[in-house]
Image (cartoon, helix red, strand yellow):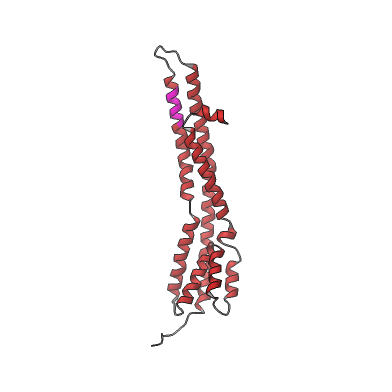
């Protein structure tokens, strides 16, 4: 491996750095975008079951917020109703939408960086190819004779950097698309859960004019 890196020349180090960063981002997103950490499938039913007759205590709401990303969205709705018993349906929906936007932003973290690496890696490979071509042209002596050692080195730089750029870019792009799909799926799940929670929580809202 070290001999390949030496043959590829100094441009390969830019791609090696990109590959390390991309691998770290992929592993981090694989861990953070698990369904149990973002949107557990039975969480909404459990919340509705617990709040069937009364609103939970602040301690229970705090535990719900720590449960998952979806738990944080549902907890925001519960806190709004607890803090303002006369809350309107529009205000409750707005509170859930604000929490949902924050949750989506949380799930999208680092995806732009991964997408940037997927786009930049082929360009860095092309940059290495150009450096290799410069080496090849530099191997041509003024009299027309070529230096075989410099010629071989230039070809190595050109081919290795092109190949390594694609090796970095293709998996990065595949995982970027995969993570985007998961984020979109989680976003839809959270929107449906919030829409289902609103009429349930509005049963606890106080109707009628405020006392003077």
The answer to whether 19 is drawn above or below residue 38 in the figure is above
The answer to whether 31 is drawn above or below residue 171 in the figure is below
Query: Residue 44 or 7: which is nearer the viewer?
Result: 7
**Toward which corner of the image does residue 189 lie, by quadrant?**
bottom right
Which percent across, then down, holds residue 185? 54, 58
Q: Which residue range is magenta in the image? A: 128-135
Q: Quadrant of the N terminus?
A: top right
Q: Is residue 26 magenta?
A: no
The answer to whether 196 is drawn above or below residue 128 in the figure is below
The answer to whether 151 is drawn above or below residue 54 in the figure is above
Which percent across, then down, holds residue 7? 52, 27
Residue farthest to the top, as pictured = 143
Secondary structure predominantly adopted by residues drawn in magenta: helix
Identified at 60% across, 63% down, the residue is 41
Residue farthest to the front, as pictured = 59
Give the mark count. 0
Identified at 52% across, 44% down, the residue is 22
Query: Residue 152 or 177: which is nearer the viewer?
Result: 152
Which percent across, then down, holds residue 130? 43, 29
């Amino acid at each position: 491996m070290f001999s390949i890196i030496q043959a590829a020349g100094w441009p390969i180090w830019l791609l090696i750095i990109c590959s390390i960063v991309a691998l770290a981002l992929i592993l981090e997103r694989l861990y953070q975008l698990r369904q149990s950490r973002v949107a557990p499938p039975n969480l909404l039913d459990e919340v509705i079951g617990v709040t069937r007759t009364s609103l939970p205590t602040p301690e229970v709401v705090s535990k719900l917020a720590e449960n998952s990303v979806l738990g944080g969205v549902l907890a925001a709705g519960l806190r709004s109703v607890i803090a303002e018993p006369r809350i309107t349906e529009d205000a409750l929906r707005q509170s859930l939408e604000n929490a949902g936007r924050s949750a989506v932003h949380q799930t999208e973290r680092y995806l732009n960086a991964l997408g940037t690496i997927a786009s930049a890696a082929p360009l860095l490979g092309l940059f290495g190819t150009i450096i290799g071509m410069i080496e090849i042209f530099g191997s041509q002596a003024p009299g027309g004779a070529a230096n075989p050692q410099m010629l071989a080195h230039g070809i190595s730089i050109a081919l290795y950097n092109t190949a390594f750029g694609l090796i970095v870019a293709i998996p990065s792009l595949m995982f970027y698309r995969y993570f985007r799909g998961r984020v979109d799926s989680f976003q839809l799940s959270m929107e449906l859960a919030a829409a289902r929670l609103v009429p349930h929580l509005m049963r606890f809202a106080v109707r009628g004019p405020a006392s003077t």
